[in-house]
Image (cartoon, rainbow, N blue to C red):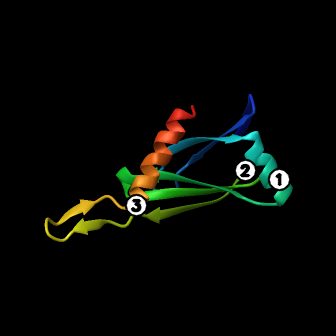
Amino acid sequence: MVSIQAQKSIIQTNCPLCGEKETIFLSKDELDYARSNHALITKAISHTNNGHVLTLYIDGEGIVRRKYCFEIAEKKDLNRNIPLPTKLDLVFDQMLKDSLNSR
């Protein structure tokens, strides 16, 4: 489902692995670029509580063409046997903060 609201497209989809409903926003510039370059927009959504990352591939018309879920690898401190945050965890945390700030 796509709707245009003040230069933003709203995409809604469900995660094929956990069923969680996701809403993402795409700018008109992102869609125009994808359309003119016959490219797909890639968006990754962290579902760390469920142990995976949902990755969406969206065309220039705002249609989700592919969905993939990637399992999150866990890194442990061998001395204390506890999980350590990885660079990817920090990147996804920042992406989540940025997406919440853009709403």
- Residue identified by numbered label 1: 35
The residue drawn where x is 73% and y is 50% is 63
Q: Quadrant of the N terminus?
A: top right
Element assignment for label 3: helix
Quarter occupied by residue 51: bottom left
| Residue 20 seen in the current view | no
| Residue 89 seen in the current view | yes
Element assignment for label 1: helix
- Cα separation, mark 3 vs mark 2, equals 30 Å
Q: Are marks 1 and 2 in contact (CB under 8 Å)?
A: no
How many residues crowd around disc 1 within 10 Å: few (fewer than 14), some, or many (20 or more)?
some
Q: In which quarter of the image is the C terminus?
A: top right
Q: Residue 63: which numbered mark, if any?
A: 2
Q: What residue type is labelled 1?
A: Arg
The residue drawn where x is 46% and y is 54% is 91
Q: Do the residues labelled 1 and 3 touch (CB within 8 Å)?
A: no
Comparing labels 1 and 3, the label whose residue is closer to the camera: 3
Comparing labels 1 and 2, the label whose residue is closer to the camera: 1
Q: Which of marks 1 and 3 is nearer the N terminus?
A: 1
Q: Which amino acid does label 2 sit on?
A: Ile
Residue 20 pos. (x, y %): 47, 46
Q: What residue type is labelled 3?
A: Lys
Taking depth in this image into account, of 5 and 102 the one nearest to the observer is: 102
Q: Residue 87: which numbered mark, if any?
A: 3
Element assignment for label 2: loop
Q: Earlier in the sequence, mark 3 or mark 2?
A: 2
